[in-house]
Amino acid sequence: GAGVSQSPRYKVTKRGQDVALRCDPISGHVSLYWYRQALGQGPEFLTYFNYEAQQDKSGLPNDRFSAERPEGSISTLTIQRTEQRDSAMYRCASSTNTDALEQYFGPGTRLTVT
Amino acid sequence: GEDVEQSLFLSVREGDSSVINCTYTDSSSTYLYWYKQEPGAGLQLLTYIFSNMDMKQDQRLTVLLNKKDKHLSLRIADTQTGDSAIYFCAEQGAGNNRKLIWGLGTSLGVNP
C-alpha cells in the first residue's frame, strides 16, 4: 500500500516568506508526527497529532511554526517569516495507536531559506 | 533531561558482525528503537524492544538491552555492503508520552 508522502520534496524560499509543508500519512494511521533533521543530526521532535487533535507541540521552536491536521488525515506544517536557520529536512511520520511507536516516515521536505 | 548517545562512526569488513551501541538516560523508557537511514532516503524502522526484555532477535539483527546500565546495542550478523547506512537509536518515555528522543546516529561503513 501507499506509504507516507510529503510535498514538496524540495523547497527553496527567500528569507521572510511563509512556507507550507504537507504530509499525507498512511491511510488509517491515527497518529502523525513532525520532525526536523539538520545535517549530521538525529530527528528533532516538533509536534504530533492523534486524529485532528494536536497532543504535544512542545518541540515547535517558536511561534512562527504551527501545524494543523483539520480532518485527522493530511497535515500541514507552516513556517511564517522564514529565517535561514529554518533550513533543514522536515520529516513526517505516522503510526497506529498501539503502545509501541512503530512510526513510518515519509521521504521528507528539504527546505532551504536563502 | 533525556539524552541518547551513540558513537558516530563504525567501520567493518564485509561478512563480519557489526555492533552499534547506544546509551540513554531515561530510566522510565518503555520502548527502544533502531532506525536505519540510507543516503538520500527516509528513516526505516528496523526493530524495537520493550524495556522488560533483554534480548530480541530478528533474522540477522540482535538487539540487547541492559536496563541497569541503560545500554542498548544492535548486532548485525554477516554485514553486507547494503547495510552501509546511518543507524539511529531512539527511546520512548513512559505513560502518554508518545514522542521519541533520538541519538545523533552511527554511520556504518562496510568495506568489501
Image (cartoon, grey):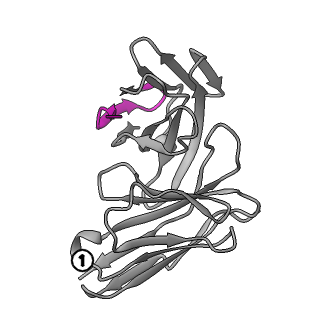
Against B57, is A25 above or below? Answer: below
Measured as percent of width and height from the top left, residue A48 is found at: 53, 57
- Where's residue B54, x and y in %? 56, 14
Q: Which three-letter amino acid code belongs to the residue tagged 1?
A: Glu
- Position of residue A61 relative to residue A10, above or below, is above
Find residue B43 and report its horizontal and vertical position in percent: 51, 52
Residue B15 seen in the current view: yes
Q: Residue B39: image x %, image y %?
A: 42, 56
Q: Which residue lies at the image location 32% right of the left edge and 62% below the top edge?
A: A61
Whether residue A60 sits left or right of residue A55 in the image: it is: left
Q: Nearer the viewer, residue B82 or A44?
A: A44
The residue singled out by tag 1 in the image is A83
Q: Is residue B31 above or below residue A15?
A: above
Residue B16 showing in the rendered view: no
Q: Which residues are magenta?
A: B1-19
Asked if residue B8 lies left or right of residue B45, the reply is: left
- Quadrant the C terminus of chain A occupies: bottom left
Q: Is residue A111 magenta?
A: no
Label 1 crowd (10 A; few <14 / some 14-19 / many >=20):
some
- In the picture, the quarter occupied by the N terminus of chain A is bottom right
Q: Secondary structure at mark 1?
A: loop
Q: Is residue B9 magenta?
A: yes
Label 1 marks a residue whose chain is: A
Q: Nearer the viewer, residue A67 or A36?
A: A67
For image coordinates 31% across by 66% down, the residue present is A62
The residue located at (68%, 61%) in the rendering is A51
Q: Nearer the viewer, residue B35 or B60?
A: B35
Residue drawn 70% across the image and 47% down it: A97
